[in-house]
């Protein structure tokens, strides 16, 4: 009979685990390379070496460079979204300062730096642009949704949606400023000001 033996099944599971682990290492290495070296310095070979896998193994998981880097930014964005929600498992409408600070933190780490390099590359690379545009739209919608949930914002009220979007635009702007200099002191004052504005606007 042509069934799959127990030994075959036992072998297949670790193989699947190894494949998932390899994929995750490649994604994390791709984001780190993009953040440190930019698009021009981040080739599949460089990422594969950093991840400790062969170029062939990298291309097995991600046939093209565009596949690898868009998947990498999406993967880490999802990880950060999960982590952001986990910070406030019961919601955080009572501590809007903490929510604003956490949202700003999203835009001051290596993920934002990596995404920025990807955006710049997409502005010059025709084949990359539609994928990055679609990815950025998806990530933006998810971040907005998380912000609305954490702030307990009622977007049916006039101006509330624009206020939340303004908060995220402000956070992105602080992230850009932080690329050149450590802007922590000014950032803290801006976070405090926005937390106060949100209390007034959202009630």
Image (cartoon, rainbow, N blue to C red):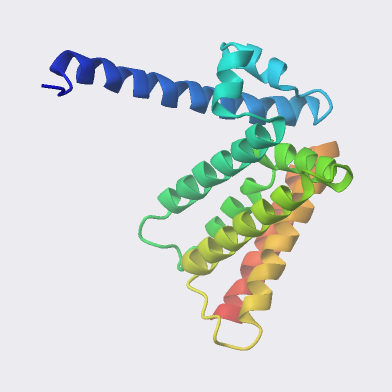
Of residue 28 and residue 123, the one placed in the foreground of this image is 123
Q: Residue at x 51, y 50 (%)?
A: 81
x then y, percent, for residue 25: 53, 23
> In this picture, is 67 found above or below 164?
above
Of residue 50 and residue 60, the one placed in the foreground of this image is 60
Please give left or right for residue 96 compared with residue 132 in the image: left
- Given the current orientation, which residue lies at the most extreme front position? 1
x then y, percent, for residue 133: 73, 54
Please give left or right for residue 9 compared with residue 124 in the image: left
Q: How many marks?
A: 0
x then y, percent, for residue 53: 56, 12
Q: Would residue 175 be seen by someone viewing this image from the given angle?
A: yes
Indicate the quadrant where residue 34 lies: top right
- Given the current orientation, which residue lies at the most extreme right position? 124
Q: Would residue 186 be seen by someone viewing this image from the given angle?
A: no
Please give left or right for residue 20 compared with residue 136 in the image: left
Indicate the quadrant where residue 61 lies: top right
Of residue 44 and residue 165, the one placed in the foreground of this image is 44
Q: Residue at x 67, y 35 (%)?
A: 69
Of residue 202 and residue 28, the one placed in the foreground of this image is 28
- Given the current orientation, which residue lies at the most extreme left position? 1
Please give left or right for residue 92 compared with residue 42 in the image: left
Specify the quadrant that holds the N terminus: top left
> In this picture, is 55 found above or below 19?
above
x then y, percent, for residue 99: 54, 58
Q: Residue at x 47, y 45 (%)?
A: 83
């Amino acid at each position: 009979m042509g069934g799959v033996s127990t030994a075959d099944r036992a072998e297949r599971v670790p193989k699947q685990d190894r494949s998932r682990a390899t994929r995750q290492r490649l994604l994390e290495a791709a984001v780190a390379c993009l953040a440190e070296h930019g698009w021009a310095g981040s080739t599949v070979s460089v990422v594969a070496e950093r991840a400790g896998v062969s170029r062939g193994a990298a291309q097995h998981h991600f046939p093209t460079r565009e596949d690898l880097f868009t998947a990498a930014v999406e993967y880490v964005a999802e990880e950060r979204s999960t982590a952001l929600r986990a910070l406030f498992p019961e919601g955080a409408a009572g501590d809007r300062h903490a929510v604003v600070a956490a949202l700003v933190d999203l835009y001051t780490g290596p993920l934002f730096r990596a995404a920025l390099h990807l955006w710049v590359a997409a502005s010059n690379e025709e084949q990359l642009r539609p994928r990055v545009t679609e990815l950025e739209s998806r990530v933006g919608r998810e971040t907005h949704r998380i912000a609305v949930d954490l702030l307990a914002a009622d977007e049916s009220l006039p101006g509330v949606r624009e206020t939340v979007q303004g908060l995220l635009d402000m956070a992105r702007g602080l992230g850009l400023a932080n690329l050149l200099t450590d802007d922590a002191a000014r950032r803290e004052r801006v976070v405090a000001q926005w937390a106060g504005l949100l209390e007034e606007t959202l009630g």
